[in-house]
Image: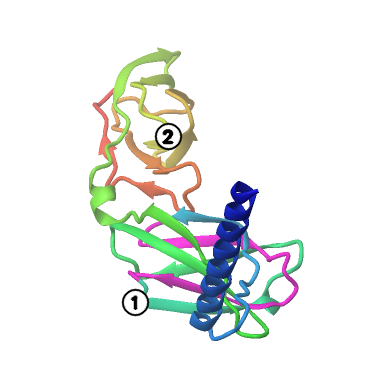
């Protein structure tokens, strides 16, 4: 009996302690319930040339009235009204004038009572620019094979997956300048004028989701054929 009575006393102390902690917690929150606005749906960041495009879908919370975007260590911000976003559409917001570096972005929703969401961070987003462009090199010619007097097939060395295509400029038999674009490692040129120098320039995407395509600083001339 004494054993059960001891547990009863201990339970009362625990209940009173919880009540006191709960009271202190409410006092700290000024007796107000904490309410968070609903989050944006499926946010992503797409890198570009000194710019980044943020994309997201509208929050399922109907009370959300705006989306606040923060970047540059929260030194810069912008507001997007919820009315600008279709219910089932993808919203795209472009941030330009960024330095060539790694940036972090935060999307915070705000509802019609001023409640804010906990925010969604998009971290380690690389911004590309002139330093990246300067590091690019054109695809190198490996060998060539002539067919007849004015058709040639060029074979190039393979490059990494960031190369999306290359373009060869060349002179035709009638001395007019033309160009051909190819995706892989070889290309056939017809009506090519022998003895002239074609030139190649390669184009790259630094990431599969990048919004911009970059090209080398200049085209490289190939050996005279």
Residue displayed at 25% across by 26% down: 224
Residue 42 in the image: state x and y as whole percent.
61, 55
Which mark, residue 197?
Answer: none
Residue displayed at 47% across by 49% down: 210
Instruction: Reply yes or no: does residue 89 show up in magenta.
Output: no
Look at mark 1 in the image and give the residue it sits on: 75
Give the number of callouts: 2
> Which of these two is toward me, 144 or 93?
93
Q: Secondary structure at mark 1?
A: loop
Residue 22 in the image: state x and y as whole percent.
56, 72
Residue 65 in the image: state x and y as whole percent.
66, 80
> Which of these two is toward me, 189 or 27?
27
> Which of these two is toward me, 76 or 61?
61
Residue 1 in the image: state x and y as whole percent.
65, 48
Question: Against 36, is 213 above or below?
Answer: above
Residue displayed at 42% across by 17% down: 149
Q: Earlier in the sequence, mark 2 or mark 1?
A: 1
Q: Would residue 7 appear left or right of 72 to someone viewing this image?
A: right
Which label sits in the foreground, 2 or 1? 1
Instruction: Reply yes or no: does residue 60 show up in magenta.
Output: yes
Look at mark 2 in the image and give the residue it sits on: 172
Q: Residue 55 occupies which quadrant of the picture? A: bottom right
Question: Against 79, is 105 above or below?
Answer: above
Q: Quadrant of the C terminus?
A: top left
Q: How is the image coloured?
A: rainbow
Give the magenta range. 48-73
């Amino acid at each position: 009996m004494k054993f059960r009575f001891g547990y009863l006393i201990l339970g009362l102390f625990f209940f009173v302690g919880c009540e006191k902690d709960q009271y202190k917690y409410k006092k700290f929150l000024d007796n107000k319930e904490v309410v968070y606005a609903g989050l944006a749906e499926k946010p992503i960041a797409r890198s570009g040339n000194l710019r980044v495009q943020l994309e997201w879908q509208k929050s399922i919370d109907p009370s959300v009235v705006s989306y606040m975007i923060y970047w540059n260590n929260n030194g810069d911000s912008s507001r997007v009204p919820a009315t600008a976003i279709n219910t089932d559409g993808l919203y795209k917001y472009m941030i330009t004038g960024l330095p060539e570096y790694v940036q972090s972005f935060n999307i915070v929703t705000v509802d019609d009572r001023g409640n804010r969401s906990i925010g969604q961070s998009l971290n380690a987003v690389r911004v590309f620019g002139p330093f990246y462009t300067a590091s690019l090199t054109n695809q190198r010619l490996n060998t060539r094979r002539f067919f007849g007097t004015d058709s040639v097939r060029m074979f190039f060395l393979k490059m990494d997956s960031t190369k999306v295509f290359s373009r060869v400029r060349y002179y035709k038999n009638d001395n007019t300048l033309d160009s051909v674009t190819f995706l892989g490692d070889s290309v056939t040129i017809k009506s090519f004028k022998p003895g002239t120098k074609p030139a190649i320039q390669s184009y790259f995407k630094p990431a599969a989701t990048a919004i911009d395509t970059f090209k080398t600083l200049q085209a490289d001339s190939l050996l005279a054929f």
